[in-house]
Image: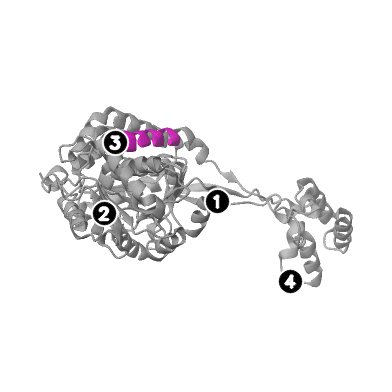
Amino acid sequence: MSWETITPPTPIDTFDSNLQRLRDSFETGKLDSVDYRLEQLRTLWFKFYDNLDNIYEAVTKDLHRPRFETELTEVLFVRDEFSTVIKNLRKWVKEEKVENPGGPFQFANPRIRPVPLGVVLVITPWNYPVMLNISPVIAAIAAGCPIVLKMSELSPHTSAVLGRIFKEALDPGIIQVVYGGVPETTALLTQHWDKIMYTGNGAVGRIIAQAAVKNLTPLALELGGKSPVFITSNCKSVMTAARRIVWGKFVNAGQICVAPDYILVAPEKEAELVACIKEVLQERYGSKRDAHHPDLSHIISKPHWKRIHNMIAQTKGDIQVGGLENADEDQKFIQPTIVSNVPDDDILMQDEIFGPIIPIIKPRTLGQQVDYVTRNHDTPLAMYIFSDDPKEVDWLQTRIRAGSVNINEVIEQVGLASLPLSGVGASGTGAYHGKFSFDVFTHKQAVMGQPTWPFFEYLMYYRYPPYSEYKMKVLRTLFPPVLIPRTGRPDATVLQRVLGNKLLWIIIAALVAYAKRNELLITIAQIMSVFIK
């Protein structure tokens, strides 16, 4: 059954009217009320919870993923995301007070107000269709932004279930779901958006970025990349590393943006690592790893299956376990595969694998490994370091720019709502999860004000033309030089601390009101400065 049958494409000629409906909701302030946002989120949560069995079934149809993996990697995350946002939203929407520099700004009450950006477009992938669809919807509603959600046509069963959930749970004035493929996505990108969020590969990310430039639309992009795994000579338990890498790589058949993509191992540890991985695979999945295995996910589509099949067929490395044995195109299955002694120019080392293959590149020193990464696969979405030497870990962190770093563990960082999922450089821009998702869809509006008291206005007269030497003296008195010592701690001076006192400025304002524009102001200010010093 084709995806068009399960989720018929949304007619492109409805896009304008649907978008206008969302804009009308935003402009009339439908989502201004925090109570309304929370009510919508609560309704969505219970509709999601009541449909869990339908969700599990849909994901299984799309990815042949074990129910346990869907619970662990998606449902638990979504549950935590709902809980975090609903519990903290009232706090997040409050104005944030910021440091007051004192001086004439003493009464300015500077603060930052989070305001919704407007109507947003979210384009999601197929690999984690529950988490990556529901999470941005939660964030957009929490931030007060109506949303158009374009779900992937490659996971149609899950898209259909979620689409029904959104329709039944949420006000159609705050969300519109779009089904379809390239034509529908292309048409959406011609519209004007207040922000676009995209999760997927870099090639499509560049197309979206080019479309966004026309309207100067801000972007949040999570683009993946080849995430390296370092197993150094200071790794005390290679078996522990093998267990964790095998789990993190083969969950969802390696179709995860932060999956360990390739391994760089200390030469003296390589043989032990290969032996440990073989042992772990036997322990976890047994000797018969075929399309009927209950704990192994399948590839999402035949084109993706063929891509992965070709990589295994063309690699110049040594296949240690797995390979094309039991490969099944009809079932879109390829078993977990380990390839060692992989050369730098191998097909496995060109692009993100996004499949159940772990290449171990040819042995080299740690310094040479770092040079390889920075020259060939800089700015990965994640980096994994198996080492028990804190100094070595810190050195690797400073040498390689990565969106996230996980030490002696893999992919778990994605499961924490308190940590941002964010790329750097070619792996993306922006961050989301929890409060970071709320921030993605809000503008940090700078707010301040000044009193209109008559005597305060006398204090501020120095800034108005015509300018004079006298006003320059006032200016330099009100804004004393920054007294930073050339050596020692650059702490605030006594003068700066005193000038941050509101009572002092009330006194100065009163003196100004009394002295008005005569030289008494300068005299008093100079005497005060000497006394304070």
**Nearest to viewer (mark 1 / mark 3):** 1
Q: Of 164 and 294, which appears nearest the observer?
A: 294
12 relative to 284, above or below: below
Does the rendering let one see residue 248?
yes
**Nearest to viewer (mark 4 / mark 2):** 2
Q: Which mark is residue 452?
A: none
Q: What is the spatial separation of the Cα atoms under label 4 and label 2, in whole angstroms? A: 54 Å
Looking at marks 4 and 1 on the same chain, the residue that comes earlier in the sequence is marked by 1
Mark 1 is surrounded, within 10 Å at the Cα level, by few (under 14), some (14 to 19) or many (20 or more) other residues, namely few
Look at the numbered disc 3 and give the secondary structure of its residue.
helix
Q: CB of mark 3 within 8 Å of CB of mark 4?
A: no
483 relative to 452, above or below: below
Looking at marks 2 and 1 on the same chain, the residue that comes earlier in the sequence is marked by 2
Residue 507 in percent (x, y) is at: 82, 49
| Residue interval drawn in magenta | 72-85
Q: Which mark is residue 16?
A: 2
Magenta stretch: dominant secondary structure? helix
Looking at marks 4 and 2 on the same chain, the residue that comes earlier in the sequence is marked by 2
290 relative to 425, above or below: above
- The residue singled out by tag 3 in the image is 69
Residue located 87% across and 64% down the image: 519
Q: What is the spatial separation of the Cα atoms under label 4 and label 1, in whole angstroms? A: 61 Å
Using the rendered view, name the quadrant where residue 434 is placed.
Answer: top left
- The residue singled out by tag 4 in the image is 466
Q: Which mark is residue 391?
A: 1
**Kind of residue at badge 4:** Pro
Looking at marks 3 and 4 on the same chain, the residue that comes earlier in the sequence is marked by 3
What is the count of numbered marks? 4
Mark 3 is surrounded, within 10 Å at the Cα level, by few (under 14), some (14 to 19) or many (20 or more) other residues, namely some
